[in-house]
Image (cartoon, grey):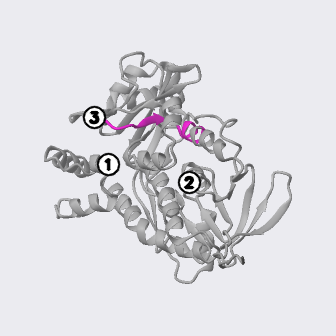
Amino acid sequence: METSTFPSEPVKPIGTIAILGAGPAGLLLAIALARRGLSATVIERDVPPDIAPRFNPDRSYTIDISGHGLKALRHIDAVAEFDRRMYRFKGLKIPGRGTEEWTLPGWTGSRGDILRALMSVLGRYKDMVAMEFETNVEGVNPVAGSLTSRQRSGESIVRSFDLIVGADGAGSTVRSALQSQVPGFTVTSKSFPNYCTMIELDNVGERLDKHYLHGLSTRPFCVAGAIRGDDGPDSARWFCAIGTKDRIGFAGTNEARKFLQDRCPRVLEFAGDEQVQGFAGRTCYHIGRSLNCSQFHAEKAVLIGDAAAPYPPIGQGVNGAMESAMVLDECIQDAGSSPGSLPRAAAQFTERWKPEADAVSWISERSLFENRFHTVRALATSMLGLSIFEQAKSAEVPYSQVRRQAERLWPLWAR
């Protein structure tokens, strides 16, 4: 008897993907792709997170991961790893506004903690992801899908990919390439009077609950939070970000102490002499910049995280970055992973994520440090149960919806 045979479906080739940047967005995307059987090459200029310092006292601040970040971490099944490595986040204690409780899973820690947790999850898929640390990308051609990188050995090589993902932060090389090489791709920049100086708090003891972020003053805007110390969960280290509308600097320790005593005396309750001395010489960073891209993709390149849309801090930087990686993964799943499908997935990503990123930028521009009108407005709307900052933490409410709800209160949120 003859056996009939039927033509089988042709196997579609799988496109090649490069991810520039091994920050929270880049690592989460690599994990998400690997979970669906897609490989990627991750290129990072710095050393691996497990040998890098967990925090930088000059710039480290305590990051809280809540709604949007939680949604992204659930997408890659990383909740248990974050439970193991970081403090559970339970909410915000804010002067004059009481406590905003957070009842869902959430965490606080340093950026280094987040990267180490994600690298641990990535270890389950090490055969799917090629990690290239201490590798500098010297040039990107988004039209051809090629990039030039200088390896740790010093060798310079050129490679081509079907999709180059810029997850390389606010100073993105991929974004610069899109802006210079793709007609119609534009970037608009804004600058706001937002500055930040860090101080470590070494005299906290048990006086502050390490599961909360604590507002110590509103003008200047001071928020303190704990990360796990090197000796385990009971050895908390506390950092306080002091946000000002002007760049601050001090001639010496006495001048710095007077500033703290006059402007945010509660900080001195928790900071010893050595930490005040360190604060006096610390760099005051300008963190009030935002960039708006006309789109997040073009040709064979796409931008996620801060590479797509850096904005002043409102507690959504890492959360939004990880969610953007999740959304790109979903777009690739929907559009397909063949070489011809990946650019279509990138276009879908712009359509889905740009309204969300624009909304976070819009919200952040209305929450500037030491702006009296912004502070009063936030307090007034919070008393009415319309706090856009609290709503922005919810994974169930898109950022764009939070913006639309606020805009209905025009002219209160008009500027």
* Residue named by callout 3: 101
Q: Quadrant of the C terminus?
A: bottom left
Instruction: Pick the quarter of the image with the N terminus.
Output: bottom right
Query: Which circle marks residue 204 in the picture?
Result: none
Q: Residue at x 13, y 47 (%)?
A: 384
**Rendering coords of residue 36 (x, y %):** 58, 57
The x and y percentages for residue 210 are 40, 25
Numbered disc 3: secondary structure: strand
- Asked whether the viewer can see residue 360, the reply is yes
Q: Which numbered disc flags the more N-terminal residue, 2 or 3?
A: 2
The residue identified by callout 2 is 32
Q: Which residue is mark 1?
A: 394
Query: Is the residue under label 1 in contact with that under label 2 (CB below 8 Å)?
Result: no
**Would residue 106 be counted in the magenta stretch?**
yes
Quick one: label 1, few (<14), some, or many (20+) residues within 10 Å?
Answer: some
Identify the magenta region: 103-116
| Residue 148 magenta | no
